Image: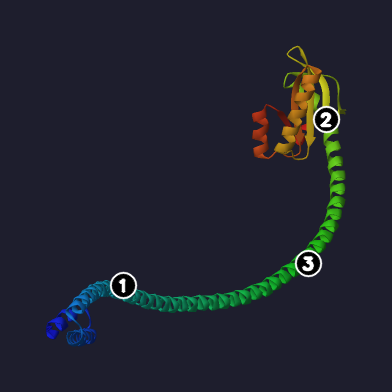
Amino acid sequence: MIDTLEILEELKETFEPPQAERLARLLARLYKDIANTVTKEEFKELTEVVKKLSERIDRLAEAQEKTEERINALAEAQRRTEERVNELAEAQRRTEESLESFKRTTEENFNRVWKAIDELAEAQRRTEESLESFKRTTEENFNRVWKAIDELAEAQRRTEESLNRLIKRVDIIEERLEGVSNSVGYSLENSAYKALPLLLKKEGVEVSGRLIRRYWQENQINIWGKGRQKGKEILILGEAKVRPSKKEIDRFIKIAEEIKRKEKKDTFLLFVAHDFPPAIEEYLKHKGIRYYWSYEFVG
């Protein structure tokens, strides 16, 4: 007789309880049927069958064990997969949080950008208004300037007309004065031609021939003559002026130097005038030029 409980416990080590119980009942019934119906020889054969069946059951148990191992491996893989999925879910959550934060930051940045653009647009509007105001002011200023220029041009035209009229009057006066000056100058020169030989003799200068008025190149020399001083032949050169100036004296000296260089003779320079201011007297002395007052011609 077989021990059903022992078989059941052994089967439970390999199979699930329901499967183990079913196999244990099947083996007990099979053993009972065999014990009641078969001969010893048949029992031997059946025992062999049972042995083979037990070996088959062992293989099934081994297969079951491998299946459970695979199931456990699958369960572990499932666990790792779930962990990975959880990690991915957590990463997804963080990504979504980062994305949400990025969206908020981007929105804030865009808001600031739009605000800055609005401020720039407002500044541009104010600039355009200022430019328009500047253009109007500039145009007004230019209009005033052009008006002032026109007024100045008109004033300049009137000034030029007045100046031209004044120049004509001055020309007339100068012509008259020149006539008077020439008349006085010629009178002074004529008196000088008569009086100078005696006055020059007192200076040790002997006049040879007559003193005359003549041109040298384009320049008129009021007093021109020849003479001797200390036994040496010289040229007597002089100017007759109502009231000589330093400019006239310098001009005369320059012409006299050219004459001296061309004629290759020493010169005796003199001035005659109705009036010699003190500064002019000093200037003539400084230049070594003899001068005579017109009143010295009377005597």
Compare residues 146 and 195 and report the one nearer the observer: 146
Name the residue: 82% across, 59% down.
160
Q: How dense is the environment of label 3, judged by Cα within 10 Å: few (below 14), some, or many (20 and up)?
A: few
* Residue farthest toward the top in the current orientation of the protein: 231
**Callout 1 amino acid:** Ala
Residue 199 visible in the current orientation: no
Name the residue: 84% across, 31% down.
219
Image spot of residue 14 (x, y percent): 20, 77
Image spot of residue 194 (x, y percent): 84, 28
Q: Nearer the viewer, mark 3 or mark 1?
A: 1
Image spot of residue 153 (x, y percent): 79, 63
- Residue receiving disc 3: 150
Q: How dense is the environment of label 2, judged by Cα within 10 Å: few (below 14), some, or many (20 and up)?
A: some
Q: Quadrant of the C terminus?
A: top right
**Marked residue nearer the N-terminal end (3 or 1):** 1
Q: How dense is the environment of label 1, judged by Cα within 10 Å: few (below 14), some, or many (20 and up)?
A: few
**Marked residue nearer the N-terminal end (1 or 2):** 1
Image spot of residue 224 (x, y percent): 83, 25
> Is 131 rendered above or below residue 246?
below
**Callout 3 amino acid:** Asp
Residue 53 visible in the current orientation: yes
> Is 7 rendered above or below residue 168?
below
SS class, disc 2: strand
Q: Quadrant of residue 102?
A: bottom left
Instruction: Find the distance from the CA under tag 3 to the CA under tag 2.
Output: 51 Å
Q: Which of the labelled discs sits on residue 65, or is there none?
A: none
Compare residues 136 and 80 and report the one nearer the observer: 80
Name the residue: 80% across, 20% down.
262
- Residue receiving disc 1: 77
- Residue receiving disc 2: 221
Compare residues 298 and 85 and report the one nearer the observer: 85
